[in-house]
Image (tube, coloured by chain):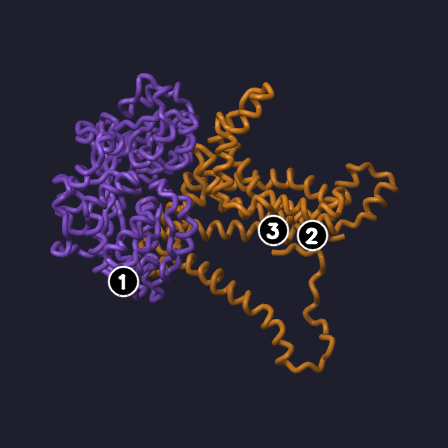
Chain colours: A purple, B orange
Amino acid sequence: MPPTQLHFDRPNLSRRRFLQGTAAVLSGLALSGCGWTLADVRTTVKTAADVLYIYTWAGYTDRDLLDRFTAETGIRAIADVFSSNEEMLAKLQAGAGGAYSIIYPSDYMVIKMRDRNLLTELDRSKIVGLDRLYDRFQNPEYDPGDRYSVPLSWGTTGLIYNSKVLDPPPKDWDYLWENQEALYKRMTLLNDPRETIGAVLRMLGYSYNTKDPKAIERAYEKLLELKPAIASFDSDAWRSRIITGDLTVAMCYSSDANEVIPENEDLRYVLPKSGSSLWMDTLVIPASAPNPDAAYAWINFMLQPEVAAEICQRLSFATPNEAAFELLPSEVQNNVTLFPPNPALQNSESLIPLGENVTSIYDRYWTRLTSG
Amino acid sequence: MSVSTKPPLSPNSPPDSGKTPLGQQWLGPVALLGPAGLWLVVLLVLPTLVIFEISLVPDIVPGMKVIPSGLDNYLLAFDPLYIKVIFRSLFFALGTTALCLLLGFPVAYWIAILAPSRWRNLLLMGFVLPLWTSSLLRAYAWVTILRPTGVLNTVLGSIGLPGLELIDRPSAVLIGMSYDFLPYMVLILYSSLEKLDRQLLEASADLGATPLETFWKITVPQTAPGIAAGSLLVFISSLGDFVDPELLGGTSSGTVARLIYNQFLGQSPNWGFGSALSTILILVVSVSIALLLKYGDRDTQP
C-alpha cells in the first residue's frame, strides 16, 4: 500500500506528537506475516525509480524542500509523518513500512533498528559531504563512524519558563523541587519515562542510562515528592498553556521551545546545569528500501550546506553541519535555545537503549507514577 | 446489540408461501446479510481471535514465532498496579455514563415530547454537530475552557464569582468525556422517547398520579430499553477513550487504554501482555452487554 501524499502547510507542528498519529498506527497494526511470524518486515511494494517515499517527523520537511529536491534530481519525493520512534518502528514491524527508502529515526532507535537488521549499511562512496559535519557528530556513540546513519538535526531537553514570573530564573532541575509551592500545578514534565526519570537521575548524580534499579527507585521517589505540584505529564499540550501564562515552567525539547518562544516574548529556554539529554535525529536507509539510489540522492541533498542552512532557519532545528552553520545569519547562530553554550552541553548525554529488562523497570516505575 | 422488547419470532413460523424453492428461500438472507457478515468475520472476529492467540504467548516481540503456551500474560494483569488502572478506567466510564444519562434524559425528553415538532430535526442536528469535529480537537477545546485563565474562569470572574481549578483533575476528565459521548445518549433516548405512548401519560394523570409518579411508573419503564442501549454505548466508548484522560486528567490519569497503547507503542513493548489486556477489556464489555441484554429485557416484561 503506497503511502498517501501529505502537504506540509503548517511546519510548526510538534516534533513528538503522539496523539494524532495513534489512530493511523493502530489501524496499521495488522499482522502482516501470516505464515505466523509476528510482524515480518519486507519490501511490500515496487516503487518506480523516480519516486522516493520518506518517513519522517512532523515538521521536518515542507513543500518547498520536496519541490527543490525534485527540481535538482528529477526524483519525486513523498513524505509521510510519524510522531514517535516507537510508532515508526511498530509500523515498520507491522509490515506497513516497505515503501520507504528514507527514515528519520533518533539516535537510540538507530541502535535498535540496527540490532534488528532493519538498516542498510551505508556505502560511503555514494555519500558526499559527510566531512562537513562537526567532528563530534562524525563518530557518535550510538553509531560509531556513522556507518548506518547520517546525523541531521540535534537538540537538548530542558526547561522552558516564563521569565516574568520566575525571578531568579531556573538554572537546574532541582529548582522545581525547591520552588514546589510557588509552582503548584503550574509545571509540566514530559510524558516519557526515559526522559523524565532520566533528568531526575542526572540531578541525583547518576547517568541517564543507569541500569541500577536502586538509582531508578530513588529517582521515582523523588518524582513522587514533586508529583502533587505537577499539573500533568505532557509532551504536547503544554505549548498553548505556557503561551497563555497558565503554566510557568515546562520540561520540553529545545526544538519545540524554539518554535514556542516567538509567540510569547517572556518565555526562555534553559539547559539545566547538571546536564540533560542530547538527542539526534538521523537519516537511515531501511534494509527493505525499494529505492536506495534515490535515498542516497536525498542524503546528499540534505548534506548540502545551503539546504541544511535553509531548513535550519525555516523549520527551526539545529544543524550538525559546520559548513551550514557558517552560512547562518548571526542571530540564528547566537540562538541559545538551538545552539546552547558548550559548558552545559558537556554534562549532557545521549539516551542509549538499555535492553528489555532494564527498560521494563523504568516503565514499571512510570506506570506506578502515572497511575498511583 | 439492539435491546428488543418484542418476543423473538418463532423460527418455525411457516413462510407465507410454502412453495418457494429452497434456493430462493436462502437467496434473500444471504444477499442481505452476506456483505455485513463477511465484514464482521474478516475485520472483527478473525482479528479478535488473532489477539487472543498472541495473548497466550509470554514475552513475544515482533519477529518471533507465535506459539501459544500459557496464561502468563493474564496472570500479569492481576498485579495490583494494573488492577488499579483497570478500576480507574471503569470509574471514568461509569461516571461518564451516569452523567450522560442525567444530562441527556431531560434534553431528549424535551426534544421528543415538549418541543414543537418542526424544530425537532434541527434541535437533534444541533446536538450531533459537535461529532463533526475530531475528539482530539474537542479535548483541546476543553483545555482552553478549563485552564486557570481560560474561558470558564474569565466568565466566572466577570460576574464576580471565584474561579474554579478543574483542569488536571478527574473532574475535568468526566466533563470532557461526558461532552464527547452525550450526543450518542441523546440520540438513542430520543428515538426511544419518541415512541412513548402518550395516552398512558394522560391516563396516569387522570387516575390521580402525580407527575413524578407518572415519570417513574410510566415513562422510565417504557424507555428502559433506550436507557440501557444508550448507557451501554456510552460505557463502551468511554472505556476505550484515552485522549480525554491524557489531556485533561493531570498526573494520575493512566487508563487501561493507555496501558494497552504502551504495550505496543511504548518504550518497552510487550505485545503479548497488551493482547491479554485487550482480551480482558473485550470480556468486560461482552459480559456487561450480556447482563444488560438479560436484565434490560426482563424489566420491561409486563
User: Left or right: A314 with respect to B9?
Assistant: left
Going from N to C along the chain, the mark reached first, 2 or 3, is 3
Label 3 chain ID: B
**As rendered, which of A353 and A48 lies closer to the eye?**
A48
**From mark 1 to mark 2, how far is it between C-alphas?**
66 Å
Look at mark 2 in the image and give the residue it sits on. Answer: B298
Look at mark 3 in the image and give the residue it sits on. Answer: B291
Q: Residue A127, how many percent across, how many down?
A: 15, 53
User: Measuring 42% from the left and 57% from the top, which residue is drawn there?
Assistant: B51
**As rendered, which of A141 and B120 lies closer to the eye?**
B120
Name above or below for residue B257 compared with residue B210.
below
**Residue lying at the far front of the rendered structure:** A71
User: Left or right: B141 with respect to A129?
Assistant: right
Q: Residue B7, how many percent across, how many down?
A: 71, 60
Q: Amino acid at mark 2?
A: Arg
Q: Mark 3 and 1 residues: CB-CB less than 8 Å, in contact?
A: no
**From mark 3 to mark 1, how far is it between C-alphas?**
59 Å
**Both labels 3 and 1 in a single chain:** no
Label 2 chain ID: B
**As rendered, which of B186 and B11 lies closer to the eye?**
B186
Look at mark 1 in the image and give the residue it sits on. Answer: A50
Res A232 label: none
User: Left or right: B160 with respect to A34?
Assistant: right
In the rendered image, is residue A225 in sight? Answer: no
User: Measuring 23% from the left and 53% from the top, which residue is drawn there?
Assistant: A298
Q: Quadrant of the N terminus of chain B?
A: bottom right
**As rendered, which of B191 and B217 lies closer to the eye?**
B191
Label 1 chain ID: A
Q: Residue A47, how many percent across, how many down?
A: 30, 64
Q: Amino acid at mark 3?
A: Leu
User: Measuring 49% from the left and 62% from the top, which residue is drawn there?
Assistant: B45
